[in-house]
Image: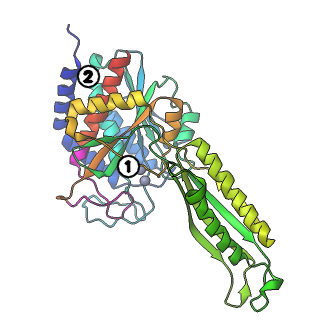
Amino acid sequence: MRKAGKDDVKERLLSLSKNLEAKFIATRRALHQIPEPSFEEHKTQAKICSLLKQVRIPHERIAGTTGVVGIVEGSGRKTIALRADMDALSMDEQTDLPFKSRNKGYMHACGHDAHMTMVWGAGWLLKQLGKDLPGRIKLIFQPAEESPPGGALELIRRGVLEKPVVHAIIGTHVSASIPSGKVGFNRGAISAAADDFKITIKGKGGHGSSPHSGIDAIVVAAYFMTHVQTIVSRRVSALESVVVSIGKIAGGYRDNIIADTVHLEGTVRTRSERMRRKVRRMLSQILDATCASFGAKAKLDYICGYPAVVCDDALTQLSEQACRDLLGKANVKQTTEFEMGGEDFAYYARKVPGTVLFVGIMNRRKGKVFELHHPRFDIDESALRVGVTALAYSAYRWLESSS
Ligand SMILES: [Zn+2]
Ligand SMILES: [Zn+2]
């Protein structure tokens, strides 16, 4: 018997996804109705298990988590994983969709309902290739992308990249800046390491009429905040991407009291580990020096978030080529989607070659124009079929090229 070539497989995947499109849409809507917070995706987990059961994909719940892993066996030794995140955001949905959130206070406003649908759908399509699938597919449904420390680290600790060993991994995210029908890729470090900090500045209280007898924590904080701006403007090369923002400040009592304490909270975004360490050091140095110059004291809590997602060049190029063959050259874009945002896909991509497939969901005519995390966010559902096929065909092409 002649082995199926990549063009046969491409046609088969395209026609399967066309026939199954209504299922993908129904599945995404069902998931959209049951948004759950990070680490508490219980109903979502049950739904994923039942979806995998329906299409006869062997799967198991990942002990101690709400994650699920499914396996599609083909006829080769290599394994590529497809990863979807499962959690929603704590916000009230403000759409008029007939399938809007039924869990008040939570909403799938980051498209994770679409990611789960696309990874499940891709698994289903690839399963139908039978022996023509030249390897194995691992479907990873991961809890808690939105809340550091995130679910990825825990799943890796529990062996999600082992038994069978994963040789490459593709993650996916919807993109509100790419029109539906198109997909996008980005090269190298595609997201930022996202760290947070909390600072307490301690001065000495006193009467507002005799500031010299106290140490005004508000003035110290003001100098510190001004100095901090020079990290980006004066101490980091203009060619680097660094953000230091202070988003919260609180302190003081009333008009005529010298404040003894000020609390500050902020975020640091960097795109390399070297710069991450450097900015952290500068932040602490500026804080100590500013406080010392006033005789104040400070405490800095620096909380490391997700590292930067670094895409593997070869895998990214291979997926891009697969998508160009599948969707046409004009429908594969270069994107900057994650930019200075954070993503715990980073942890997988540190262990095995990884890349992220961005699926366009924007459609002005249909009014699908809201950004991720917006209370009126929604996707153009025609993107589901595109995402399903793009993931499936990229995975197929990787297995074909490495078997
Ligand atoms: Zn998000
Ligand atoms: Zn997201």
Query: Residue 88 is drawn in which quadrant?
Result: bottom left
Is 338 left or right of 377, judged from the image as shown? right
Q: Point out the image quarter for the N terminus.
A: top left
Part of the protein shown in magenta = 367-383
Which image quarter holds the C terminus?
Answer: top left
User: Which residue is under mark 1?
Assistant: 337
Q: Nearer the viewer, residue 290 or 147?
A: 290
Q: Few, some or many C-alpha atoms within 10 Å of disc 2 (few <14, some 14-19, many ≥20)? A: some
Q: What residue type is labelled 2?
A: Leu
Callout count: 2
Where 308 falls versus 287 (above or below)? Answer: above
Q: Mark 2 points at which residue?
A: 129
* Three-letter residue code for mark 1: Glu
Residue 144's disc is none
Q: In this view, does 68 lie to the left or right of 357?
A: right
Residue 75, compared with residue 323, is above or below; it is: above
Quadrant position of residue 169: top left
Residue 41: image location, x then y, percent? 46, 49
**Is residue 294 located in the magenta-colored stretch of the structure?**
no
Residue 127 visible within the image: yes
Determine if the magenta segment contains residue 379: yes
The residue located at (43%, 50%) in the rendering is 339
